[in-house]
Amino acid sequence: MSWGNSIPLLKAMLWHLGELSRDSLYMYNLIKRMAQSVVEVMEDAKGKVQENLLANGVDLTSFVTHFEWDMAKYPVKQPLVGVADTLTKQLSQIEMDLKSRTAAYDTLRLSLENLEKKSTGNLFTRTLSDIVNKEDFVLDSEYLITLLVIVPKQSYTQWQKTYESLSDMVVPRSTKLIAEDSEGGLFTVTLFRKVMDDFKTKAKENKFTVREFYYDEKEIKREREEMTRLLSDKKQQYQTSCVALKKGSSTFPDHKVKVTPLGNPDRPAAGQPDRERESEGEGEGPLLRWLKVNFSEAFIAWIHIKALRVFVESVLRYGLPVNFQAVLLQPHKKSSTKRLREVLNSVFRHLDEVAAASILDASVEIPGLQLNNQDYFPYVYFHIDLSLLD
């Protein structure tokens, strides 16, 4: 390799690679953040995350064990500082793009979650816009108004017997049960506007709760369209599972309370907007595609940096001409690591007696090195952690 004759550049790289050493954790954390972003985006297919974390089209272990320096991307005739700068700038650009893309995704996800939260809870707290219909109300009347009243299940009979007499000017037979949950039911009742306050007071005395709700067709339509738009955006732009929206049936999977609409089979159940997500096939949105491509690029760059550090530190330790062999060791069991260390220290002890002694005696300091002696061995060593989802 032509770098072996670049003694002045090797000296310059000593400082530069010191910077790379300190940035190593940052690089690894960037790759881990990208892996975690893949987990978040593939929320409906988390079991398939690992098969999407590839480097150059192969699994990470295979890439590392068959690693070859990419001469086209990082020419060895280029100065070492230039190669290192190219690698770090590449990772910096990926990080900037990751921040902007995940920020956009998080904004969309949070907006959708906030809308979905309105459809959770019981009849006292949840939105009613996906439960009620225009036909449930007397609208555009100067004198009449329709109220929504929550009645405990054990008080259904009492409500039916007493609601007309709670106040004057209640329209007879105007009540209708339109939805219920595990605690009670939502009833309509129509009365004259001028007795509304008196009716609310009497209802409260009888443990009936009037929900403050006024039917606004434009607002309800806007809310439903917003939910549909957000679901569609998440489906088309980000998620791995293509999602369709289907009217009727059950609540969202993460909802705690199910509210069953009554009387109208086409009325959507509470706990969902008026549609439900349903799998319709597999696909990849732009964010997942970007993550897969750039995770591969970042991982490959990271391994090149590891290789670059191995080469330079080996030359700095053992001198010129180049006379060392880089190998990859992978213990079959975690418990084998200690035994492997003992064998390596025994075989290569002669390369650095002070370092070998310090492994056995933690009080021994290695002259000229500001390293914890636990990290220093008589051979050049760098750890490659592939447990990116732990």
Image (cartoon, rainbow, N blue to C red):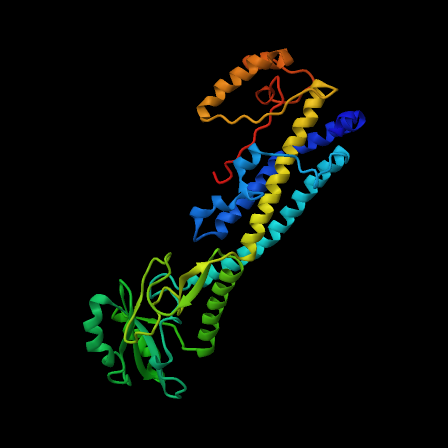
For the N terminus, which image quadrant? top right
- Residue 373 percent coordinates (x, y): 59, 19
Task: State the residue in front, 237 or 21.
Answer: 237
Q: Name which residue lies at 70% across and 30% down.
A: 17
Instruction: Name the residue: 49% across, 25% down.
Output: 331
**Does residue 264 appear left or right of residue 389 in this picture?**
left
In front here: 204 or 6? Answer: 6
Q: Is residue 252 above or below residue 224?
A: above
Q: What residue occupies the far bottom of the structure in this picture? A: 142
> Going 73% across and 34% down the picture, which residue do you hit?
76
In this rendered view, identify the residue nearer to me: 160 or 248. Answer: 248
Q: Position of residue 266 (x, y in %)?
A: 33, 74
Nearest to the observer: residue 75 or residue 132: 75
- Estimate the x, y position of residue 338 in percent, counting from the top left: 49, 20
Q: Is residue 20 above or below residue 244?
A: above
Instruction: State the image quarter where residue 213 is shown.
Output: bottom left
Residue 26's image quarter? top right
Residue 272 in the figure: left or right of residue 342: left
Report the number of discs.
0
Q: Would residue 363 be seen by someone viewing this image from the given angle?
A: no
Direction from residue 175 to residue 75 in the image, left or right: right
